[in-house]
Amino acid sequence: MSFKNYLQNLEFSPSTIKRYLSFEKAFNLYFQLKNKAPKDLDYNDLLSYINDKQQSKPKRSTMVLLLGRIQQYYNYLGVENPIQDFRLKGYEQPNKPPILTAVQLKQIAVVYHQNKRLGLVSKVALSLLIYQGLSTHELPLLCVEHLDLQQGEITIPSSRLETRTIALEASQVLDLMQLTEGKGLEVSLLDYQGSKHLQNRHSHWKAQVKRELKKHNLAISFINLQQFRNSRIAHWIKDLGILHAQYLAGHHRLGATQAYQAEDHEALRATFTQLHPFF
């Protein structure tokens, strides 16, 4: 699939697609002159590219857009962006959603699952985000063949992240058995139907979670679905160690996992301040 088709599937406007294609042409030409392919670039290669772009002293907003286009291009290529954690000097990141405790994650999973009006697909998908720390972009990749219900495991196929096999919770197995009954091995596990369907479904799940928390009077600072993955990785680091957490998260680089370790430290510091306000 071409980059243009990829952007069209995301339903970008024609003018936005035109700007992205112009970026793609210039980006590839820059590295062709250096005899390097985008998939083979490392952090230093891209840092050199960014530094060259900054020589003309563009506006900060221009550089932010450039970083966004680089990230989207690597999303299309299906490999990890070597500078995905890069931040412009003086550019403050928006506050990240707080890390949810293991108890809070369990509470969300339980109250969501107990709502009999919610579909089985939604319940299974949300449980995979909470317990296995999947990224939302990985959900459409799952097929029935990725499940091993006898062993209680699921294999996450390669995407922007590494392939890995993760144990299922006992409470997930029965739902997955019901969901896959009568389905062929190559059938989509969660019945995704294109990018628009994907985006609508994720927004719907987010709204459903918020309604369930409100209905059960649970004071949990839930912001978005990505928060589940962030929180799960932070707990893996604390409970299993950084290297095991890197495998379960599917990160190519240890540094990507260490970023979640920093978030976990912030959560611990906030808890300490709450318990010991005079320190």
Image: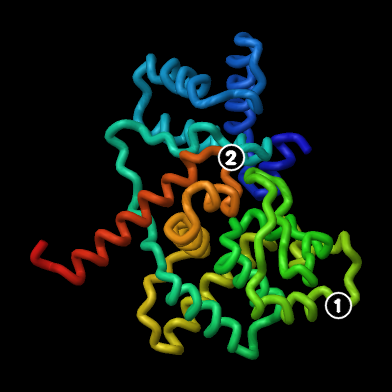
| Above or below 24: residue 180 | below
Q: Residue at x 36, y 62 (%)?
A: 98
> In the rendered image, which residue does mark 1 sit on?
181
Q: Residue at x 87, y 60 (%)?
A: 186
Q: What crowding class fits label 1: few (fewer than 14 Cα within 10 Å), some (14-19), or many (20 or more)? A: few
Where residue 80 sits, quadrant-wise, is top right
* Dot 1 amino acid type: Glu
Q: Earlier in the sequence, mark 2 or mark 1?
A: 1
Please indicate whether residue 77 sits to the left or right of residue 59 in the image: right
Q: Secondary structure at mark 1?
A: loop
Q: Position of residue 27 (x, y in %)?
A: 59, 22
Name which residue lies at 42% across and 30% down.
Answer: 63
Kind of residue indicated by mark 2 = His
Residue drawn at the location 56% of the way across and 82% of the way down: 112
16 and 237: which one is in front? 237
Name the residue that disc number 2 marks: 252
